[in-house]
Image: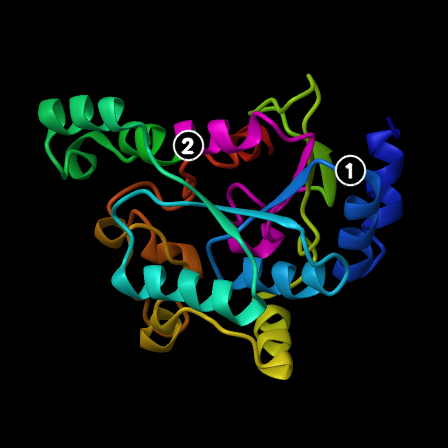
Amino acid sequence: MENITELNLELSAKSPRDIIKHALATHSNIGISFSGAEDVVLIDMAVKLKKDVHIFTLDTGRLHPETYQYLEKVRETYGIRIEIYSPDASALQAFTNEKGLFSFYQDGHKECCGVRKIAPLRNALSNLDAWITGQRKDQSPGTRNSIATVEVDTAFKGKTDQLIKYNPLANWSSEEVWNYIRAMEIPYNELHSKGFKSIGCEPCTKAVLPNQHEREGRWWWEEATQKECGLHAGNMSQP
């Protein structure tokens, strides 16, 4: 295994495409997590390097109709297979029977996200050695400003004890992401044209006003600096 500190220093100076190329060449058992605008940029770059790259997504059961339509559009556009991971039916039924469908407005979003997102992600990662995400440093000043280009995932374990996590877009801005989307004419979620910048589950996401930070539309009833659901729980321990 490569020295992660040295590898991060080396890759952080490279382009997202080169980072993805390294990741795909290094790990035969690697997946790309797909949900939003950043992730389709990763897919566009990756499928041009390796057509059969493994792509997965989480269906929480509470996504916007536009998001489901978007997932299908990406699948058709690239002619790819997207593996869908859903919440455990028994766990979800027990949770909603006890707490109802909107407990997060009173109790916070972590419990609901644990059932609908974290458990399915743990399942998705359990057979992988590495994964690629669309995280950017400027997405959340409170939790993502220090993310590395490549790191050991301290929140999840894959097939081996050490799960490697690549963030090829860590140093990109939102503007760079959208410049790429427009230049390459690749599909994006229609909600972005309706004022939604960061898109999650329908009850927990709203459009933002001009000059508002993109994460202000997520879990808007909670502390503004802690806009994480747990998919990238390792970020929460960073300064």
Q: Residue at 41%, 55% (x, y): give it.
A: 215
Q: Quarter holding the N terminus?
A: top right
The tally of labels here is 2
Relative image position of residue 126 (x, y in whole percent): 56, 25
Of helix, strand and loop, which one carries label 2? Answer: helix
Residue 102, compared with residue 180, is above or below; it is above
Q: Which mark is residue 27?
A: 1
Does any portion of residue 10 appear in the rendered image?
yes
Relative image position of residue 79 (x, y in whole percent): 56, 65
User: Does the magenta-highlighted stretch encompass residue 85?
Assistant: no
**Mark 2 closeness class: few <14, some 14–19, many ≥20 residues within 10 Å:** many
Residue 102, compared with residue 67, is above or below; it is above
Q: Residue at 41%, 69% (x, y): give it.
A: 189
Relative image position of residue 150 (x, y in whole percent): 74, 40
Most distant residue in the top direction: 161
Residue 125 appears in which quarter of the rendering? top right
Residue 234, compared with residue 77, is above or below; it is above
First in residue order: circle 2 vs circle 1: 1
Q: Amino acid at mark 2?
A: Pro
Q: What residue is pinned by disc 2? A: 120
Q: Are marks 2 and 1 in contact (CB under 8 Å)?
A: no
